[in-house]
Amino acid sequence: MELLVDIRKKLLGFELDVSFEASKNILGLLGASGSGKSMTLRCIAGIDTPDQGRIVLNGRTLFDSKKGINLPCRKRKLGYLFQNYALFPNMTVEENIGFGIGDKNREDRLAIISEKVKLIQLEGLEKRYPNQLSGGQQQRVALARALAVEPEALLLDEPFSALDDYLRGQVVNQLTDNLADYQGVTLFVTHNMDEVYRICDQLVVLSMGKIEAKGGKEEVFKCPPSLVAAQLTGCKNFSQAKYISPFELDALEWGIRLKTKGTIPKQIKHVGVHAHMLEIARDEKEDNVFRCWLKFASETPSRTIVYLVTERDHQKQNHGTLQWEIAKQTWLELKDKPQPWTLRINPVDLIIV
Ligand SMILES: Nc1ncnc2c1ncn2[C@@H]1O[C@H](COP(=O)(O)OP(=O)(O)OP(=O)(O)O)[C@@H](O)[C@H]1O
C-alpha cells in the first residue's frame, strides 16, 4: 500500500508545493489554518486539480500532468471524511453507509453494511436518521460510509473539529481502534498537535503551502528541522543562538550559555526548549542551571503556565521570555518560595534549529 504525492498548484496569493509518500502507517498532515492541508487532500481526491505533478496510489496513476492523466473522483477508490460529516439527512444510518457501494448484489451490499455497523458499534440504530444520533455517532457513521466503499486510501480532514473535548477524546480512541485493521493508506489532516501525536505514526508539517518537516512523529517532534516546524509541533520557548563551540552555545534572548548533547552546527540560528521540559535544579553545579524570576502565571484546572524572566531580563526589567508548564500541585508548592528560582534545562532537551 503506497500513495505518492508530488504536486504544485498556484492560486492568487497562495502556492501549494508538496511532495511526500504515505504507506500503511497513518500519515498526519499538520499545519496552521490556511497552510494547504485541505487543498492537498482535495487534489488527491480529485476535487481540485493541481497545475503540475503526479499522484500515484498503489501503482495506479490518479493524476499526471505530463501524461495528461486526471482520473475522476469516483474512479480513484478513495474514502473521504470531511470536517462536517455531511451525512444525508433524509437517509437512515444503513442507507448512508450503503450510499457509495458500487456494483454489488443486494446480499453483498447488506453484508458490507452490517459489517461496518458492527465495526462502529451502532448495532440496533441502523434505521435511525442522522438527527436522531449524537455528534459522535454521526461521526462514526461517516467513517463507516467512507470505509464501505473499500477505499485504497482514506482521507480524513479534521474529522473531530465539531466535537466537544470529552467526545473528541472518546472518538479519537474509537477511530484508532476502527482503523487498526484497515489495510489501506490513511491521511489525517489536523492543526491539533496532540491529536496528530496520538493517531499518526508518520508526520508531514505544512506551512504556507510548503513542507517544513517530514518523518516519524517522534523524530519530528523531538528534532524539528526549522523554527516553524518547532512552533507547529508545540515548542513555546525560542531564542536566537550563537555558536560557541561544538557543544556550547549562547541563547542570546535569554542571556544564558547552554551545553548541548548533540553537535551544534556553526550556522545555528535558534535554540528551543519545550515548556514542559524545564525542571527545578537539584544541584547548582550541573550543566545549564540558571536563575529566574516569576513574571506571571496562567492557570488551567490541571496545569499552570509560568512566565519567567532570566537574570539579564530581570535586571533590565524586560518582558518574560520563557514559558514553563508544570502540574498544578508543583505550582502550589512553588509559588510562595523565595525568588529567584533555580531551574535547569537538560542538554538532551535542547532543540537546535
Ligand atoms: N478556491 C480557492 N481560490 C483561491 N484561494 C484558495 C482557494 N481555496 C483555498 N484557497 C487558499 O489556499 C490556502 C490553503 O487553503 P486550505 O483550505 O488548504 O488550508 P488548510 O490548511 O486546510 O486550512 P484550515 O485548517 O483552516 O482548513 C488558503 O490561503 C486559502 O485561502
Image (spheres, helix red, strand yellow):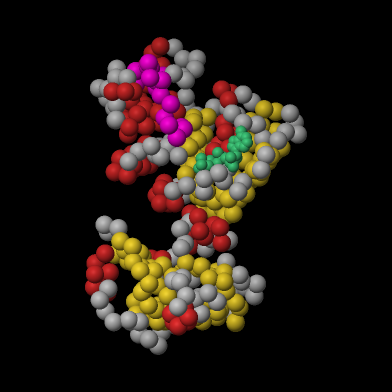
Please give the range of residues in magenta: 81-98
Question: Is residue 147 toward the left or the right of residue 35 in the image?
Answer: left
* Furthest residue in direction front, as rendered: 317
- Residue drawn at x 42%, y 37% is 159
| Residue 41 included in the magenta stretch of the image | no
Q: Quadrant of ligand 1?
A: top right
Image location (x, y in percent) of residue 283: 35, 85
The answer to which image quadrant residue 328 occupies is: bottom left
- Residue drawn at x 60%, y 48% is 208
- Given residues 179 and 339, the one toward you in this image is 339
- Residue drawn at x 54%, y 57% is 229
Image location (x, y in percent) of residue 43: 60, 34
Does residue 320 appear anywhere in the picture? yes
Question: Is residue 127 toward the left or the right of residue 197 in the image?
Answer: left
Q: Which part of the image, by quadrant, shows the N terminus?
A: top right
* Furthest residue in direction bottom, as rendered: 285
Question: Is residue 106 toward the left or the right of residue 152 in the image?
Answer: left
Does residue 147 appear anywhere in the picture? no
Looking at the image, is 60 positioned above or below residue 10? above
- Given residues 135 and 313, the one toward you in this image is 313
Image location (x, y in percent) of residue 84: 43, 32
